Amino acid sequence: MTATTSRQASVARVYIGRLAGTPVFDPLGDQVGRVRDVVLLARVRMAPRAVGLVVEVPGRRRIFLPLTRVTAIEPGAVITTGILNLRRFQPRAAEMQVVAELFDRRVRLSDGSGEATVQDIAIERQRNRDWVATKVYVRRVSAFAAFGRGENLLLPLNDVTGLTGPTSAQGTEALLAQLTDLKPADVAEVLHDLPDRRRIDVARQLPDERLADALEELGEDDRVAIVSALDIERAADVLDVMQPDDAADLVNELPDDKAAQLLERMEPEEAADVRRLIAYDEHTAGGLMTTEPVMLGPEASVATLLAHARRADVPAALAAIVFVVRPPLETPTGRLLGVVHLQRALREPPTSLIGTILDTDVDPVLPSDGIGKLTRLLATYNLTALPVVDEDHRLLGAVSVDDVLDHLLPDDWREADEDVTDEMMDDAVEERRGDE
């Protein structure tokens, strides 16, 4: 798309459910982001006015784009003036996010015929060029609703009540559908941006694996609040499928009594890993390591190595380097023999034994080694992970570069603007430069 490409006239009615995900373009036709939500401003005795779009720009940052800076809304495209404020979006009082706060909300039909759930909301452009919410698309709640036989209705906005106010009567179906194909970091971003009650409701409906992945990406306050709101059995199930180092970090952040209850209800093997990790200081190799890197014996073939590296549950940083050890092949293992880099393995015949392509020059670290030493080793040798061994050279786990970065950055780095994050990173590195 370019500025000279012919376009259809900007539409006068927009359904927000269809607008979500639409690319946003500047006047030259370059894509600058995607629409994730629409912000309505509640008004007394008047229909809510749409004041702007929540737009996701590169870097997964969600910003506010005022509708006054939108020149056209077309099928498949939103055109802007090109002026964007890249400060992270923060909702204000009396503002509502339609997808996050209104979709799936239970409302009452004004004619007294019962209740319905909100499926979509339409906004229309007025003569003064304001956009106002005018229609609501609902599914009437009935005895057959659970079987998909609820009646769908398109109504004027004033034909329903309960659209604003507390969100206790809001479902999660529409929002969960939007999260289906998102990466864990993007799911975490969506959860972080939701109102507190809505965040908990959505988290409760996520599958264990999806919630575990999102918790690994969330900041401390959000993930503690979510886990604390789950029933104890569900919380333990989620911790069971988290990476052991992330589960240990989360357990450390919980009150002692809650942490003890969770450890008692976790699978014994998973709980044992977490107990072992929380015994170390959080800024040491022992506190940062995972107990589940990719580990194989020297007699394994390159084909076997590649199969393990392809596993969906192995993070990319850990898949790039395989630790070759003597049995047992669970931490603490037998003696560490060396490592095999994925790039080297890709150059070898599938039947080659990995014991013949070992790199023995990667120096392991001890559990007590500080984050400063880990940072220097990872940077000096361009590694994605380091082996952690005990005094007998048995592998205890591995520290990945992403976990080191997470601990170098301040706790609230996910919520900070890019320029502020750069300053915080400089300060954090300076503080920890001499940390051993």
Image (cartoon, grey):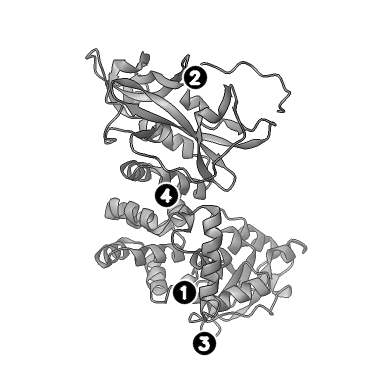
Give the alpha-carbon distance from disc 3 to disc 2, as whole Å.
72 Å
User: Which residue is pictured at 47% across the width and 31% down the height?
Assistant: 52
Label 2 Cα crowd, 10 Å radius (few <14 / some 14-19 / many 20+):
few
Give the alpha-carbon distance from disc 1 to disc 3, as whole Å.
20 Å
Q: As shown in the figure, which amino acid type bears the numbered disc 3? A: Glu
| Earlier-in-chain disc, 4 versus 1 | 4
Which residue is label 3 attached to? 391
Q: Is residue 270 above or below residue 355?
A: above
Which residue is label 2 attached to? 129
| Earlier-in-chain disc, 4 versus 3 | 4
Which residue is label 4 attached to? 211
Q: As shown in the figure, which amino acid type bears the numbered disc 4? A: Leu
Residue closer to the observer: 400 or 165: 165
| Earlier-in-chain disc, 1 versus 3 | 1
Label 3 Cα crowd, 10 Å radius (few <14 / some 14-19 / many 20+):
few
Residue 224 screen position, x and y as percent: 34, 57
